[in-house]
Amino acid sequence: MPFDVRKILEQLETGTPAEAGVPAWQQESWADADGFAAALATAHVGRGAPLKSRVGQQYDFFHDVVVRHGSSDRIALRCYDRRSGWQVLSYRTLQEQAARRATEWARQGVKPGAKVCLLYSVGSELLISLAAALGLGACISYLPPQGKRFIARRLALLQPEHIATEPHQVLLVEGFEKQMLQNGGQASPAFTSHTYKPEEPVGLLFSPLVEPAGTPVLLTAEDAWRGALVDGMLTFGLSPGEHLAAPGYHPLQHLPAFLFTTLLRGATYLHLELQDIEANPALLTQHPVRALGVSPALRDVLLRTRTPLKNVAHWFRNPEEPIDWQGWRAWVQQCGLSAVPSSNALVDPAAGGTVLCSPRRVRDVHTEAPPAPGRSWALRDVNMSGQEAPGDLGVFTLLPDKERPPGYLVLTRAYGVYHYGGPRTARREGRVYPAAEVAEVVSGLPFVRGAIVLPAPTGGVAGHYRYVLLVFTGTQSLNAGAWLQEIRRRIELQMGAEHLPDRTDFIPLYPRKEEGALDEAWCQTQYLTGALHRKSTDPLFQALTSLRSHLLEKKDGPGV
């Protein structure tokens, strides 16, 4: 079916939908995803250099995201370094350095389809290595350099043929030193960019939306390219040279999708760390931002510092984050954004970009989140039977779903309007909390006789959970301050600060075990019903715990 992209863009820019609910063109795009993508690709080129990719046939990422813009002076990346200030990477420099790096890597054995893990903080090195890997047709994985145990487990699952990182990160890749690529940057460019087939893997990503935590998930070239096309033109409305920024957004969920989106459009990815914004909020106002992703953490920083945002053309939030209605309204008013369009945008890295998004419009904070344009999807039974949802509430499922992870979020439909309804199971802002990994890290501490992380509902916003770390300590005298400090240090070192639990409780008992492992169901029931608290102060259970201490500690040593 024909799509008038010019009218669609006009409607999105003015923020005045032609009808209530989901526009007709968006509903048609769900039914004819191929035709919609082809229409967008034609409009995307405009008067610029032609694309080498062909919708549904082939995808040359290196050409479309780098080479097409390499002759211009536009900036691909602008990031802030607290020691040296603003750093920029132009498309011209990106093309030159990525071509040299790809040539070097080809000589080191990187071939089409090879698994290449990119282990970088966001910056020029990440973009150059990403472009080089795409040029060689590699299957990329991305990991931020955080937590030695966190990295080691994921590398063991991935088993990459090559790892690209900076020399000072060598301790994080212990056991994989031979897979590290050398980046001299001196080779003369001599390679032909790879063309991916639609179903060819362009990524194996550690999506935090997938259970169990740490599972690498396939990203096809088709999904990556189409996701970047739709997000660049429609979700964020980027034009060449404009900025997309999302300080504090989860890197494993939003990268490389945000990078593909900005690079395909010839736009600029603006990167700032939350700590730097807190120290100097004016950093966020120094460049005009076309689309700003706002997390609750960024919102609170800007509220505390009373920072006006006159340089923002559109802001968006993740609908999976709990809605603090009062906080959001206060922030919008205080920062002067009452007349600025906003939207909800949920990004799935394994789908290549935004899967749920509301149109850009000036209005109050809301829960509206219809499926993104150009997505084929279904509403499935919440019982996960596989059948279609019998009513207007079900599990949002991308199609085809054979090779995809099972859906997890509930979508509701009322009078033609779609709303985010929360996750089916306990999650932290939609992401899977690596409870088993955190418990394993804490279990190694000398004062711990057992550890488990349990989700507990907050009683507030639907689908919002807190993660409670239960630490069983036996008969030891409580030393909460020192123990909490040691637990925090251990988790930050081994897993990264983002995986700190919301609460830690010390239980002066021994946990029940089955075949050497903690009985999770027993722990959860005992904790949520208050039984653990009652037992910890009951003289009878204190005596039994003391007896167990004599039997276990003396005979086999702590922690048995």
Image: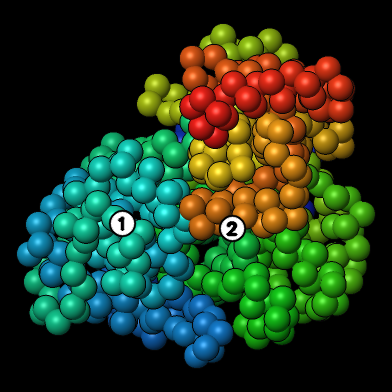
Residue 115 horizontal/vertical position (percent)? 24, 48
Callout in the foreground (1, 2): 2
N-terminal of the two: label 1 or label 2? 1
Residue 71 sits above or below residue 447 on the image: below
Displayed quadrant of residue 378:
top right
The residue lying at 79 percent from left, 71 percent from top is 302
Decide: few, some or many residues near mark 2? Use Cα within 10 Å; few <14, some 14-19, many ≥20: some
Residue 10 horizontal/vertical position (percent)? 64, 59
Relative side of 466 to 42, left or right? right
- The residue identified by callout 1 is 173
What number of labels is visible?
2
Residue 45 sits above or below residue 528 on the image: below
- Callout 1–callout 2 Cβ contact below 8 Å: no
The residue lying at 76 percent from left, 44 percent from top is 478
The residue lying at 81 percent from left, 59 percent from top is 362
Displayed quadrant of residue 303:
bottom right
Q: Is residue 408 visible?
A: yes
Considering the numbered disc 1 on the image, is that residue within a helix, a strand or a loop? helix
Nearer to us in this view, 517 or 553: 553
Residue 394 horizontal/vertical position (percent)? 67, 20
Gap in angstroms between the C-alphas marked 1 and 2: 20 Å
Displayed quadrant of residue 551:
top right
Circle 1: residue type:
Val
Nearer to us in this view, 9 or 393: 393
Circle 2: residue type:
Arg
- The residue identified by callout 2 is 489
The residue lying at 52 percent from left, 82 percent from top is 81
For residue 512, which numbered disc appears in the image? none
Nearer to us in this view, 480 or 42: 480
